[in-house]
Image (cartoon, coloured by chain):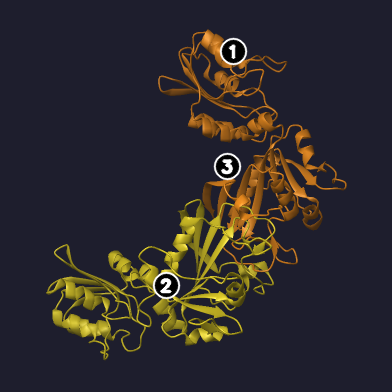
Chain colours: A orange, B yellow
């Protein structure tokens, strides 16, 4: 299942509104098929893996999300296709919350005499499909806030100059993160001060540059989406992963509304002193209220910088 | 030598102006003596270890600093004592920069027919005696700056409330660090706003509370030292390790004058937003000048907080 979860990551940021799923088919200890949801959402991971495997009779299929029980104009229901192919066993990480499937895919497989195991590596699989699951549960995209700060929490000098706080390895990592989101958003102030390109400048990934959005009043540049209010988040079609890149006012607005699910904190080994802070006023009245909301889930070294990833508790 | 360096740590903050040294004596693969510089600076580590070992003829003595070549009213020269005891070999991490010894201890041992190896685990040993070595090289104490911040670099809410940013494990660690310094310093503003006790509140270490100092103009409370100017640093007798605990103005003054050797950054997994920053204006005109000054040397998890230790490059 760990390998299937890794495959699921390949579709992240390219499958909305469909989930990015991964699938591995194994027979006699040999991997005979590997699949992941293709760009645009079809084929599904199971169909992709089965096309590679051919005959899967007697095999075990490992899939990160319950196979769908609903046919659509774009393809048949995976649960039906799998049932017809007669694998011995299907291991599933997460039950699909979509009401058109939610347990019915599992029931269909079991009715066909296939052994079904659920909840396998569920936490890791949920993390890999955070966009789809957040959309299903909350009706809005999964939101990642990115901050690149000095060790004293500054993002720029008092005059606004911010090139560079972090080094090339951290910036490349942030570009990779961009490619895993359907949309990048900055505030009006950042747009006007920096005119950022917000594209993915990594060899081979140029085509993965997400759609761009600006938060705040006023017109959006051509090709950009305008997000005038946080309630507009629910209306973003085809965006299950939103990457918020600042500035401090926009970060504060998202945090104050409790709309940040994941926080990427890149810290450079520099002291800036007087300067601009990463996050504006979030209306915190008591330090006690700030605790138990975030947990550190990963850290890594990127050149001389450090990345810490926090997730909502 | 690694064990000798660990022993050296026991005297840290209690031996100034003498170095905190560690010594291990081994014969036939068995440790027969362990010593470290005792509080106040005497006995020296070698004398302490030799008293435990008794006869050390033919043994190997591992010591973090070159044995002293100068007798004093408080005790004989270690190089003489060791030479008389006829160990087969002496391994030394760091040559003593004190001009009364600087190589003469090694020469005395060699003249007695003892095999001497130098530079063993030198970097780690230098770090363990940073206070003594900084005093020898720069004529001032080794300075550690402690910061306890939210993940957005805040040390307090706008109204100054700062209890608590970090949790009990991080605060206990900071108290342990206090015990490893001869003096703790805060700025005038912190003194007046918080009236901090600055003592070591750890079971068994209450007696290790360092002397206290206040930086800035005005009178010092009874029992405190007043540091009116950074040049006063050179005059602090018996202080080889100074622990600077804030606030932002004091931190900035030390950083701007390039007087910080080590930076302890405790980061809590909380977002504060608007609030007080850890470090005031250090006169940085260009971000490029901020780079290549600090390197991360250690990180650890303390409860839900993280400690990152940076040292001057």
- In the shown orientation, is residue A101 left or right of residue B78? right
Q: Which residue is mark 3?
A: A313
**Subunit of mark 3?**
A
Measured as percent of width and height from the top left, residue A103 is found at 58, 17
Between the residue at mark 2 and the residue at mark 1, the CA separation in whole angstroms equals: 73 Å
Of the 4 image quadrants, the one containing the N terminus of chain B is bottom left
Q: Nearer the viewer, residue B167 or A183?
A: B167
Measured as percent of width and height from the top left, residue A17 is found at 70, 28
Measured as percent of width and height from the top left, residue A79 is found at 59, 14
Which badge, 1 or 3, is on the more N-terminal residue?
1
Q: Point out the frontmost of discs 3 and 2.
A: 2
| Co-location on one chain, circles 2 and 1 | no
Q: Which residue is mark 2?
A: B209
Q: Which residue is mark 1?
A: A81
Q: Which mark is residue A212?
A: none
Residue A163 appears in the picture as rendered: no
Is A96 drawn above or below residue B67 in the view shown?
A: above
- In the shown orientation, is residue A184 left or right of residue B110? right
Between the residue at mark 1 and the residue at mark 3, the CA separation in whole angstroms equals: 38 Å
Residue B133 location, quadrant: bottom left
Q: Point out the frontmost of discs 2 and 1.
A: 2
């Amino acid at each position: 299942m760990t390998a299937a979860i890794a495959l699921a990551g390949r579709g992240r940021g390219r499958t909305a509104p469909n989930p990015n799923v991964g699938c591995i088919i194994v027979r006699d200890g040999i991997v005979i098929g590997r699949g992941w949801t293709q760009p645009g959402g079809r084929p599904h991971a199971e169909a992709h893996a089965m096309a590679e495997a051919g005959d899967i009779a007697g095999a075990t299929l490992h899939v990160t999300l319950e196979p769908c029980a609903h046919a659509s104009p774009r393809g048949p229901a995976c649960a039906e296709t799998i049932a017809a192919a007669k694998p011995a066993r299907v291991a599933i990480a997460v039950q699909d919350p979509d009401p058109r499937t939610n347990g019915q895919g599992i029931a269909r497989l079991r009715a066909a005499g296939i052994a079904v195991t659920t909840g396998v590596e569920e936490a890791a699989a949920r993390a890999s499909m955070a966009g789809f699951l957040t959309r299903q549960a909350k009706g809005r995209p999964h939101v990642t806030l990115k901050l690149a700060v000095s060790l004293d929490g500054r993002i720029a000098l008092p005059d606004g100059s911010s090139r560079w706080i972090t080094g090339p390895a951290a910036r490349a990592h942030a570009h990779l993160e961009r490619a895993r989101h359907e949309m990048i958003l900055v505030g009006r102030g950042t747009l006007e001060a920096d005119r950022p390109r917000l594209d993915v400048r990594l060899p081979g990934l140029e085509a993965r540059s997400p759609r761009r959005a600006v938060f705040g009043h006023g017109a959006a540049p051509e090709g950009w989406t305008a997000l005038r209010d946080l309630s507009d988040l629910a209306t973003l079609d085809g965006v299950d992963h939103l990457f918020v890149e600042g500035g401090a006012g926009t970060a504060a607005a998202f945090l104050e509304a409790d709309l940040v699910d994941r926080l990427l904190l890149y810290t450079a080994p520099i002291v800036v002193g007087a300067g601009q802070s990463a996050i504006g006023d979030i209306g915190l009245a008591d330090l006690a209220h700030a605790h138990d909301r975030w947990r550190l889930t990963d850290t890594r070294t990127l050149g001389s910088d450090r990345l810490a990833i926090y997730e909502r508790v």
